Image: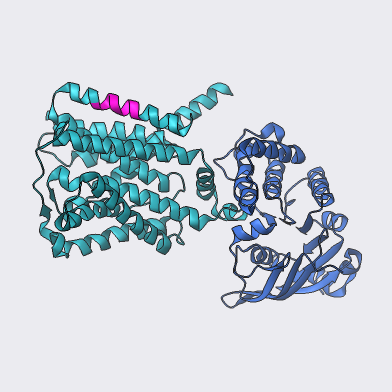
């Protein structure tokens, strides 16, 4: 078996006396679709922040694509192929939708070495990405003109512009309607079919169950289950965490 | 417009300004014009950090004074032409800008601003107690009366500051449309998202503080020659901090033209007020004017004149 794309070993993170992550270990293979669930405050977003370099973990290590990530700043991890979307959309508010995609194209794709994208190709690529997520008509608009679902799509498109190997979608569907959730799920599936590994963090169980090949459950900073979705949700410990005794 | 074309156009405008100023036939035009141009450089330099990346710097007097005092110190040691002294002042202020950036850029928002204010206080205390460059009683030079070709020394100073402002504006404008400019804008809008998009935020912020500091230092370097006297009170005056923030804010901070508009307006009004009969005997009226105009703009046009124009254009197209 080929080595996993992402290998998290015994990662721990504290905020003062509060243990946010307690020795989390996790492996994700190339091309996999993994769902990460857990009640509020269980450490999902903290784990994402530690993986992406927004926060520094205190113990354990993160390996991605064969390289050790520990201590690397976030922008270098993005350049190595790890992209994320944010739980609350964080667009560049003074830049147009197309310009929002320009940032990762200029700073990630161009910074990877090799060929620099000429301006025409940058425009070409951002048009293609906007087409992929269905925001072509909004290219010249500012983010404040977008609806919630369009904002989520922009968030995903910007992560995709960095040409990642791994996309971590942090609650990309929170607050969306039934059909909008299906919209985003279809988009994520298309990305996965292009060979991108996806970790989906989500509360909407319908979405997680239909999307994930594997489910990981965090509760109070510990991983309590990891396996096939149907088996994991029948796990008594998971039921207890979600439904109580 | 391409950058070199813009530079040629800016030089042409500069030449026009210079010859118009000469045609007035009054030396005072150069004395007053120098101050406006000096503010144009300071405002443009401030805007590279404050407008483009969103880090509000209250330390303009520190960088300006560093340039001025570099000249004072060097003049005591060697004889150098003024353009060389300006480069030296730029290097000193740029290095201090880099060091300050490294120490303070992990602070965000208002904490960064407080740190820059502290830098000005620390430097002023240091210079006030350094007797080699005059300490608290200041230092002076006997400045030449004339220069070859131009004639009066005031014209020479005016011309140097004019060239520096053309340089500063050209740099600011070329940043705006570049990869660097997009990176700065991303930092201004959301630093965490910028990092996640691959922007090396610390490196970019250091470029901004260094460049901004260096330009401020270059603007300060000829100050000793302008006034023939330099002391900590005049080099560290609050005017520099207030004006270099107010001018970009009034014009608009997201573009190179904002500081230009703001400086011409505010700097022009200040120069008028300082010679106008109406305000005779009230030298502080300058700062009062800045205050009143700034309050008006913060209330009525928070994005400056550029913001007003843009929202009008948007309304007419929608």
> Residue B74, can we see it?
yes
Q: Is residue B17 magenta?
A: yes
Query: Going 26% across and 35% down the picture, which residue do you hit?
Result: B267
Q: Is residue B85 magenta?
A: no
Q: Is residue A137 left or right of residue A178?
A: left
A104 in relation to A98, above or below: below
Q: Is residue B129 left or right of residue B8?
A: left
| Image quarter in which the C terminus of chain A is found | bottom right
Q: Which residues are magenta?
A: B11-18
Q: Colour of chain A?
A: blue
Query: Going 73% across and 64% down the picture, which residue do you hit?
Result: A65
> Residue B276, can we see it?
no
Query: Going 19% across and 25% down the picture, which residue do you hit?
Result: B22
Q: Position of residue A211 (x, y in %)?
A: 85, 55
Q: Quadrant of residue A234?
A: bottom right
Considering the whole magenta stretch, tell me its main secondary structure.
helix
Q: Colour of chain B?
A: cyan
Q: Position of residue A42 (x, y in %)?
A: 71, 69
A185 in relation to B16, above or below: below
């Amino acid at each position: 078996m080929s080595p996993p794309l992402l290998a998290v070993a015994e990662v721990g993170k504290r905020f003062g006396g509060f243990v946010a992550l307690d020795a989390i270990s996790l492996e994700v293979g190339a091309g996999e679709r993994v769902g990460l669930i857990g009640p509020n405050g269980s450490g999902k977003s903290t784990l994402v922040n530690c993986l992406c370099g927004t926060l520094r973990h205190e113990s354990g290590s993160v390996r991605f694509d064969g390289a050790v990530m520990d201590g690397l700043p976030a922008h270098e991890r993005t350049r190595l192929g790890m992209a994320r979307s944010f739980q609350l959309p964080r667009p560049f508010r003074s830049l147009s939708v197309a310009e929002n995609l320009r940032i990762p194209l200029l700073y990630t794709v161009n910074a990877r070495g090799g060929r620099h994208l000429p301006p025409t190709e940058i425009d070409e690529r951002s048009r293609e990405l906007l087409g992929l997520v269905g925001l072509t008509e909004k290219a010249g608009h500012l983010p404040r003109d977008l609806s919630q679902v369009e904002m989520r799509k922009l968030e995903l498109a910007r992560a995709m512009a960095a040409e990642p190997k791994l996309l971590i979608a942090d609650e990309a569907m929170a607050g969306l309607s039934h059909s909008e959730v299906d919209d985003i799920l279809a988009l994520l599936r298309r990305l996965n079919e292009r060979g991108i590994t996806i970790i989906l963090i989500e509360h909407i169980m319908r979405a997680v169950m239909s999307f994930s090949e594997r489910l990981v459950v965090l509760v109070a900073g510990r991983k309590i289950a990891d396996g096939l979705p149907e088996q994991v949700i029948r796990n008594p410990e998971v039921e207890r965490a979600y439904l109580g005794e | 417009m391409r950058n070199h074309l813009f530079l040629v156009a800016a030089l042409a405008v500069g030449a026009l300004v210079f010859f118009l100023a000469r045609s007035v036939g009054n030396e005072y035009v150069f004395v007053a014009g120098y101050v406006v141009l000096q503010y144009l450089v300071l405002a443009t330099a401030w805007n590279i950090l404050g407008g483009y990346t969103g880090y509000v710097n209250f330390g303009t007097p520190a960088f300006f004074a560093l340039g001025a005092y570099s000249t004072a110190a060097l003049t005591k040691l060697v004889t150098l032409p003024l353009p060389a002294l300006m480069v030296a002042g730029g290097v000193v202020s740029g290095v201090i800008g880099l060091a300050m950036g490294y120490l303070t850029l992990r602070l965000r928002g208002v904490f960064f601003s407080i740190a820059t204010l502290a830098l000005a206080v620390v430097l002023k205390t240091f210079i006030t107690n350094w007797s080699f460059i005059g300490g608290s009683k200041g230092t002076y030079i006997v400045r030449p009366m004339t220069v070859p070709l131009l004639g009066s020394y005031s014209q020479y100073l005016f011309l140097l500051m004019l060239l520096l402002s053309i340089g500063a504006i050209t740099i600011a404008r070329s940043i705006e449309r570049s990869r660097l400019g997009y990176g700065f804008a991303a930092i201004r809008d959301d630093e965490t998202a910028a990092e996640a998009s691959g922007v090396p935020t610390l490196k970019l912020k250091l470029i901004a503080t260094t460049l901004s500091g260096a330009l401020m230092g270059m603007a300060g370097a000829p100050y000793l020659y302008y006034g023939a006297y330099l002391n900590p009170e005049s080099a560290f005056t609050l005017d520099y901090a207030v004006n270099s923030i107010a001018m970009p804010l009034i014009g608009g901070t997201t573009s190179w033209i904002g500081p230009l508009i703001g400086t011409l307006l505010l700097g022009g009004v200040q120069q008028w007020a300082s010679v106008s009969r109406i305000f005779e005997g009230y030298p502080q009226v300058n700062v009062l004017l800045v205050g009143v105009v700034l309050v008006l703009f913060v209330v009525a046009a928070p994005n400056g004149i550029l913001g007003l124009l843009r929202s009008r254009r948007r309304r007419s197209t929608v």
